[in-house]
Image (spheres, rainbow, N blue to C red):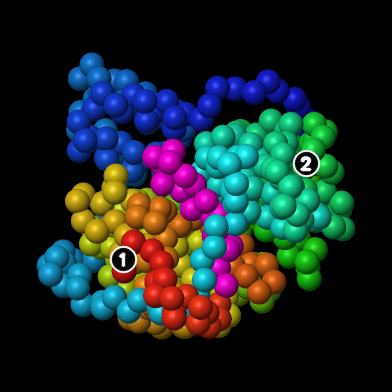
C-alpha cells in the first residue's frame, strides 16, 4: 500500500488521440481508435504522431491484432439471426442522469448506489460525480484526483469506498467522496495494477473484487494488505476483458475481445466455465455485429434475463449497421451460444454505446456514451407492462 498525493494532470490521452486523428484519413482513424482500449495509454498517441511524418509501417497499427476466431463468414449469413425486438411496452428506458442541464456526463463508466450516495465514475472528465442516494439534488464533483475512473464500490465493514483509478494504475480507498483524504494501492496480491477496470463488493463474503483487464487477472481483498488474492483468467478469457459481474454469489467476467463470458465457479481453484457467443468472427475490442460479432462490455441478470452490452459504434463498424445487437438479452447461456437472443438496441439512440450495468432494487441501470460529446447518459431500465406507452403508440428509439 502506498499513500501519495498528486496534482491533476492533463485530460486523458484519448482526448489528445482524437485531436491528432483529425489529421488522418478516416480508414486510418478507425484502425487507430479501435486499438486504444487494448494498448498502453500513450503508445497510440506516439503511433499517430509518427504516422503523421510517415514513420510507422502499416503493420504497427495492429496494436491488438484482429485475430480470426472462426473461418470466414459470408456476409449474407450474418442475417441468420433474426431481429427479435422486444415489445416497447414490456420495458421502459428512462434517462436517469443527467436529468437536467446542471451536469454533462463525459463517458460515464459506472453508476454506484453505495454508502448513502449515487456516484458516477466519468472516464473523459476524470471525475467522480455524486449526490445523496434517492435525491434530486444537483451532482457535486469529488475533490479526489482520479484519472479515467471506471467504478466505485463501498465496503460497509471497512467503512471505505474503493475506486478503480484506471489511468493512474491504482485503486483508491477513502471514507468520504467529498473530502480529499485517501490511500492508494498499486499492487494487490503481488500483482501490479494495470488500468484496473471495475470494482465489486460481495457482501456475503465481505470481499472487494477488482479487474486487471488487459491479460485479465481478477483481484480480491478485504482491505489493502488484508486477505488479498488473485485469479489469472487470461487463458479462459483470451484477451482484453472490460467488466466483472457478481450474480447470486457467482463471479462473471465479460471477455470482450473474444466475445465470451467466463463464469467462475471456484476462485481458489480457478474452476471456470466459458460461455461462447454465436457468430463471433474476429478478436477485436470494438466493431459491429457484421464485422466482428459480439464484443461484450458487461453482462447482468435482471428479472430472469441476461442483459449483454456490446461495444458497437460507427467509428469501428466499417460502414455496417453499428446499432444491431449492441444491446441484447437472453434466457440461458445456450441461447447466447445459438443466437437465440432478443434485440434491445432500439431503446437507445443511434450510435449510443451501452457500457456497464448496475442492478438496484427493481431497476437495472445502464451507462452509455457516444464519443461525439453530444450527450452521454445513465438509463434506468424497468421491466413490466406499460400500457400507456403501448396505447399512445410511443414505441421509443431510433428503429421504429
Between 351 and 161, the one lying in front of the other is: 351
Q: Residue at x 14, y 65 (%)?
A: 75
Using the rendered view, name the quadrant where residue 301 is placed. Answer: bottom right
Kindly report which numbered mark, 1 or 2, lies closer to the viewer in this rendering. 1
| 194 shown above or below 95 | above
Q: Earlier in the sequence, mark 1 or mark 2?
A: 2
Q: Residue at x 79, y 38 (%)?
A: 178
Q: Is residue 242 visible?
A: no
Decide if residue 59 is on the left or right side of residue 163.
Answer: left
Point out which mark residue 291 bears: none
Q: Picture coordinates of residue 373 (x, y %)?
A: 44, 38
- In this view, which residue lies farthest toward the front? 392
Query: In the picture, which quadrant includes the N terminus?
Result: top right
Between 218 and 336, the one lying in front of the other is: 336
- The prevailing secondary structure element of the residues shown in magenta is strand
> How far, Cα to Cα, is label 1 from label 2?
40 Å
Q: Which residues are magenta?
A: 365-382
Query: In the picture, which quadrant includes the C terminus?
Result: bottom left
- In this view, which residue lies farthest toward the top? 53
Label 1: element kind: loop
Q: Picture coordinates of residue 330 (x, y %)?
A: 44, 79
Point out which mark residue 177 bears: 2
Point out which mark residue 399 bears: 1
| 230 shown above or below 29 | below
Amino acid at each position: 500500500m502506498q499513500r501519495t498525493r498528486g496534482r491533476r494532470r492533463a485530460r486523458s490521452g484519448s482526448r489528445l488521440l482524437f485531436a491528432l486523428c483529425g489529421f488522418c484519413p478516416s480508414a486510418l482513424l478507425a484502425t487507430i481508435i479501435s486499438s486504444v482500449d487494448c494498448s498502453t495509454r500513450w503508445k497510440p498517441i506516439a503511433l499517430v504522431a509518427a504516422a503523421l511524418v510517415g514513420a510507422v509501417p502499416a503493420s504497427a497499427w495492429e496494436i491488438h491484432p484482429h485475430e480470426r476466431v472462426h473461418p470466414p463468414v459470408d456476409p449474407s449469413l450474418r442475417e441468420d439471426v433474426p431481429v427479435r425486438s422486444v415489445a416497447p411496452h414490456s420495458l421502459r428506458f428512462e434517462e436517469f442522469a443527467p436529468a437536467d442541464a446542471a451536469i454533462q456526463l463525459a463517458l460515464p463508466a459506472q453508476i454506484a448506489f453505495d454508502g448513502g450516495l449515487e456516484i458516477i465514475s466519468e472516464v473523459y472528465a476524470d471525475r467522480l460525480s455524486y449526490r445523496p442516494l434517492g435525491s434530486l439534488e444537483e451532482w457535486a464533483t469529488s475533490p479526489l484526483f482520479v484519472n479515467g475512473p471506471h467504478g466505485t464500490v463501498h465496503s460497509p465493514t471497512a467503512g471505505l469506498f474503493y475506486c478503480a483509478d484506471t489511468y493512474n494504475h491504482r485503486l483508491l480507498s477513502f471514507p468520504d467522496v467529498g473530502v480529499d483524504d485517501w490511500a492508494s494501492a498499486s499492487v494487490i496480491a503481488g500483482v501490479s495494477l494495470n488500468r484496473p477496470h471495475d470494482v465489486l463488493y460481495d457482501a456475503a463474503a465481505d470481499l472487494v473484487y477488482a479487474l486487471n483487464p488487459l491479460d485479465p487477472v481478477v483481484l480480491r481483498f478485504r482491505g489493502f494488505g488484508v486477505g488479498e488474492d488473485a485469479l489469472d483468467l487470461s487463458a479462459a478469457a483470451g484477451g482484453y476483458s472490460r467488466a466483472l459481474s457478481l450474480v447470486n454469489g457467482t463471479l462473471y467476467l465479460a471477455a470482450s475481445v473474444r466475445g465470451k463470458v467466463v463464469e467462475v465457479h471456484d476462485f481458489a481453484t480457478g474452476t471456470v466455465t466459458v460461455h461462447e457467443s454465436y457468430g463471433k468472427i474476429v478478436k477485436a475490442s470494438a466493431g459491429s455485429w457484421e464485422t466482428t460479432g459480439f464484443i461484450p462490455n458487461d453482462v447482468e441478470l435482471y428479472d430472469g434475463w441476461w442483459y449483454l452490452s456490446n461495444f458497437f459504434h460507427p467509428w469501428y463498424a466499417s460502414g455496417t449497421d453499428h446499432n444491431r445487437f449492441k444491446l441484447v438479452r437472453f434466457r440461458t447461456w445456450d441461447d447466447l451460444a445459438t443466437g437465440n437472443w432478443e434485440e434491445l438496441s432500439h431503446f437507445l439512440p443511434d450510435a449510443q454505446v451501452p457500457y456497464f450495468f448496475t442492478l438496484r432494487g427493481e431497476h437495472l441501470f445502464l451507462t452509455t456514451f457516444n464519443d461525439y460529446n453530444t450527450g452521454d447518459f445513465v438509463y434506468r431500465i424497468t421491466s413490466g407492462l406499460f400500457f400507456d406507452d403501448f396505447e399512445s403508440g410511443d414505441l421509443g428509439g431510433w428503429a421504429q
